[in-house]
Amino acid sequence: MAFSSEELERYARHVVMHEVGGAGQQALSRARILVVGAGGLGAPVLLYLAAAGVGTLGIVDDDIVSLSNLQRQIIHATPDIGRPKVETASEAIARLNPHVTVVPHALRIDPANAADLIAAYDLVIDGSDNFDTRYAVSDACFFGRKPLIMGALGVFDAMLTTLRPFERNAEGEPNPTWRCLFPQKPPPGTIPSCSEAGVLGALAGVAGSMMALEAIREIVGFGTGLTGRLIHLDARDMRFGETLYGWDPDNPLNGEAAQATGETAMALRG
């Protein structure tokens, strides 16, 4: 597809980059990305991907905008209070870039619907705020063979990684799954929620912007990806760190037992 003169001007700072160029911008315009959560992480993800010219953005969120959201969820505004987040996020994207197609999914993603939701997309970004959703999304992306960018926020910390466990590394070993990194959900009540512990609004912006950047790198194809790399941000002391992690042969998705039997944790599908 050829860009219009207005689009060429809009994306000019990408097009002149050697690492992106016209081909990379075309790849972005063809991309279909599903963003899970239009909250603290999802807000900057959606805005920066829309600004970058991603062709189709799906938004999954079943919540409405509340006043306490506005400290960090910058895609929503005061007049939006009480409205569905997928609606207000869609309107904000349309104001920013009318060339982006938005597909709102006003529902909660779970093991029963995750596979169908991700099927129409090339890449998934999980900015959810609960462990049930993260495991449902990561399992579905494994079975659906979809790259997944995962981010999470604490009070003063954030983390980011990319999962491609349906592929193998240069040594022929399977790439790690989310369950290789975190085998089980923490017991209920052990980790306080955002409403209980708080979170820095600007931290959500930084982490969400990094997730958007990782998505752009995945789509365009430059730099070293985050598969097997967990990036940490400590906002209290403004420090970045990295943890390398690998395939766990005991994981239920692509572990040794699953490969030997061909029964890849069927119970995880439901």
Image (cartoon, rainbow, N blue to C red):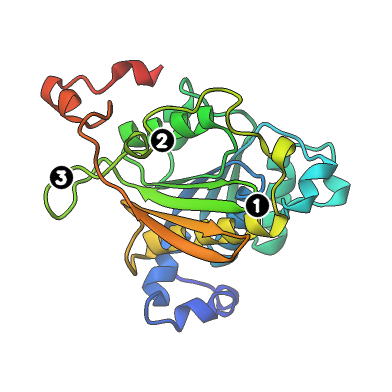
Residue 242 quadrant: bottom left
The mark that comes first in sequence, 3 or 1, is 1
Distance of label 2 from label 3 (alpha carbons)? 19 Å
For marks 2 and 3, give the one nearer the viewer. Answer: 3
- From the image, tell me which residue sits under label 1: 43
What residue is at 55 percent from the left and 52 percent from the top? 158
**Looking at the picture, does residue 165 appear above or below residue 113?**
below
Looking at the rendered structure, the kind of residue marked 1 is Ala
State how many labels appear.
3
- From the image, tell me which residue sits under label 2: 138
**Seen in the image, is 12 located left or right of residue 250?**
right
**Seen in the image, is 212 located left or right of residue 173?**
right
**Seen in the image, is 258 located left or right of residue 106?**
left
- Is residue 231 something that shows in the picture? yes
Looking at the rendered structure, the kind of residue marked 2 is Ser
Looking at the rendered structure, the kind of residue marked 3 is Glu
Give coordinates of residue 112: x percent, y percent. 47, 20
Q: Secondary structure at mark 3?
A: loop
Give coordinates of residue 25: x percent, y percent. 44, 69
- From the image, tell me which residue sits under label 3: 173
What residue is at 63 percent from the left and 53 percent from the top? 156
For label 1, the crowd category at 10 Å Cα-Cα, with few meaning under 14, some 14 to 19 and many 20 or more, is many
The mark that comes first in sequence, 1 or 2, is 1
Q: Secondary structure at mark 1?
A: helix
